[in-house]
Structures are given as structure tokens and as C-alpha cells.
């Protein structure tokens, strides 16, 4: 006998409902059960790199040595020598001079200039101060023109004041080891036993002022029998054989700078006095 169709549909729907209920119950039970940790470590995904990878950081540079203190190069020694008559001459110079009546005697005192340092000197300036009693205009003019043959490129000029005559000599360059003798003109009008001061100063680039002071004592040979040099005073005798007579001026000139100098003249021994015995009558 056949089953009606609606009965078959009802049975199938009941079976499907029961299966769905069983499935839902099983899913609920699985959610309540704790999950076990997986023994495998999941790999960490790296982000995708589209740019060129950067270079590795450079290794740190080794520590630099501590800076050393700055030491300037050693300065070359600068030295200028200046002396009248001789480097060993004392401050007092005694000149026996013989004058002709009505005429002036011009002497040339040797001024020694030397660069004894380790380097050249620039802008050297030498100043000589004399009393007006020892100067004469014609002699100073000639000195400015002819007196600097030993210093190439040097220039000289002079200035007069009420009591003094100042001579200035400028040397642009004085090489190391250079030596020169400058004839300083001294015009003697009266050979009196008088001492006149002479002051000489020198200036140079990189040097302190150098100063020399002298006394020029004039002696009359007629009144002095035998002048003798001592430690504190030299007797300087000019070369009278080189005396020249100026035809147009009342002037006699000794152009030579050579002087006869006895640094320590011998002392004449004194004659012993005789011993007298008492007179007996």
C-alpha cells in the first residue's frame, strides 16, 4: 500500500532537524573544550623589501691620539754690534791733536757696525749725537755723499739744533755676518783739554735699542809730554801723515780711520832716590 506523500515529507524533515540538532550540540561542545598548544613554531613573516638594503654601519674608528701642544719654531738669534774705535774700547777716548793756526782739523772716527746674529737684519737705523763744538757743515755734507761706501744702499743725513748735531744713517738691509766701518767726521776747532760726549744708538727690526756712550777728550800735544792709556781711557793718536789741506776751506782733513792705540801703555819706572847719610862735622 502506498505511503502518502505528505507523510514522507514530514519524516524527512524530522530526520534533518535531528541531524542539525546533533551537529549544533557537537559544535558547542568543541568550543567549550580548551585548545592544545601546537608544538610547531609558526614562522614569522618578514615584510617585503622593495628598496636596496642599506650598507652595514661602519666599524668605529680607533681613538685619535691626544693633540700635542703647539711648539713654535725656534727664533733665530738677532744681534747687532756697535762700537767706536774698537769693540774693546772704553768709554773715554783721549785724542792728542795738533792744529794749524786758523784752520779746522777734521778727523774720521771709525764706527764699527756688524751683524753678528744668525739672520739678516732689516731697517737698521744708526743715530750719532755730537756737540756742535765737534761738527762742521762742509764735513757733514761730504760725509752724506761719500762716507757710506762700506754700507751699500745706505743713506745719511744730519740735523742741527741749538747745541747738538744729529747724524742719522739708514740701512735697509744688513746681511748676516756683514761688517762695516763708518767714518764719523769730527771737526776740531780748539784743542783744549776738554771732554765732549758722543752718544750712538742703533735700531733694527726685531731688536731692542742699542746704545753706546763715549767721551772724546782732546789733548794738546804741546802740554802733554807722554799720554798713557789706561783701563778706563785709551790714547788714540791719528795718522798725521794722511793729513790733507783743503784748498777752498779753512780745513785740514785726515781721511784715514787708522789710529795708533796702546790699550795699556807701560808706566815709566821712577828713578829711586839716593839714600843720604847724616852729615857729621
Image (tube, grey):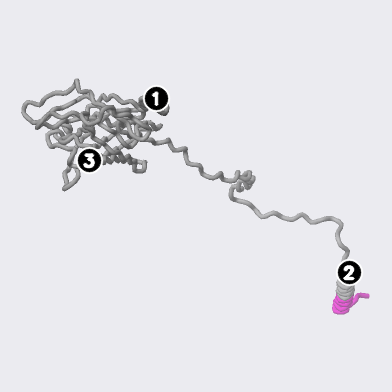
Say whether disc 3 or disc 2 marks the residue closer to the N-terminus: 2
> Residue 214: image x %, image y %?
30, 38
> Which quarter of the rendered picture does the C terminus lie within?
top left
Label 3 residue SS: strand
> Residue 223: image x %, image y %?
22, 31
What is the magenta segment's predominant secondary structure?
helix
Q: Nearer the viewer, mark 2 or mark 1?
A: 1
Label 1 residue SS: loop
Callout 1 crowding tier (Cα within 10 Å): few <14, some 14–19, many ≥20: few
Residue 235 on the magenta span? no
Q: Nearer the viewer, residue 93 or 224?
A: 224
Q: Which residues are magenta?
A: 1-18
> Residue 157: image x %, image y %?
18, 38
Instruction: Identify residue for label 2.
Output: 34
> Residue 37: image x %, image y %?
86, 62
Q: Is residue 44 above or below residue 158?
A: below
Q: CA distance from mark 2 to mark 1?
A: 156 Å
Q: CA distance from mark 1 to mark 3?
A: 51 Å
In the drawing, what numbered circle is on residue 274? 1
In this view, which residue lies farthest toward the front?
A: 281
Instruction: Identify residue for label 3.
Output: 130
Say whether disc 1 or disc 3 marks the residue closer to the N-terminus: 3
Amino acid at each position: 500500500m502506498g505511503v502518502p506523500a505528505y507523510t514522507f515529507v514530514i519524516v524527512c524533515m524530522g530526520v534533518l532537524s535531528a541531524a542539525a540538532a546533533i551537529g549544533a550540540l557537537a559544535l558547542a561542545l568543541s568550543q567549550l573544550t580548551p585548545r592544545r598548544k601546537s608544538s610547531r613554531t609558526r614562522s614569522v613573516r618578514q615584510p617585503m623589501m622593495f628598496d636596496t638594503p642599506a650598507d652595514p654601519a661602519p666599524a668605529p674608528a680607533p681613538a685619535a691620539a691626544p693633540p700635542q701642544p703647539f711648539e713654535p719654531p725656534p727664533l733665530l738669534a738677532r744681534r747687532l754690534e756697535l762700537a767706536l774705535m774698537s769693540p774693546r774700547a772704553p768709554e773715554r777716548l783721549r785724542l792728542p791733536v795738533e792744529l794749524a793756526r786758523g784752520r779746522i782739523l777734521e778727523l774720521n772716527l771709525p764706527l764699527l757696525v756688524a751683524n753678528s746674529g744668525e739672520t739678516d737684519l732689516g731697517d737698521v737705523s744708526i743715530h750719532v749725537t755730537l756737540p756742535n763744538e765737534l761738527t762742521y757743515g762742509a764735513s757733514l755734507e761730504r760725509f752724506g755723499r761719500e762716507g757710506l761706501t762700506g754700507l751699500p744702499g745706505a743713506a745719511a743725513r744730519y740735523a742741527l739744533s741749538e747745541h747738538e748735531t744729529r747724524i742719522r744713517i739708514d740701512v735697509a738691509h744688513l746681511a748676516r755676518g756683514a761688517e762695516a766701518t763708518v767714518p764719523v767726521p769730527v771737526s776740531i776747532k780748539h784743542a783744549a783739554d776738554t771732554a765732549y760726549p758722543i752718544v750712538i744708538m742703533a735700531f733694527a727690526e726685531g731688536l731692542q735699542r742699542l746704545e753706546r756712550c763715549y767721551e772724546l777728550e782732546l789733548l794738546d800735544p804741546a802740554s802733554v809730554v807722554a799720554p798713557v792709556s789706561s783701563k778706563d781711557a785709551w790714547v788714540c793718536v791719528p795718522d798725521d801723515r794722511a793729513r790733507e789741506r783743503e784748498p777752498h776751506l779753512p780745513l785740514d782733513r785726515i781721511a784715514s780711520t787708522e789710529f795708533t792705540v796702546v790699550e795699556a801703555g807701560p808706566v815709566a819706572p821712577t828713578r829711586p832716590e839716593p839714600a843720604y847719610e847724616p852729615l857729621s862735622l
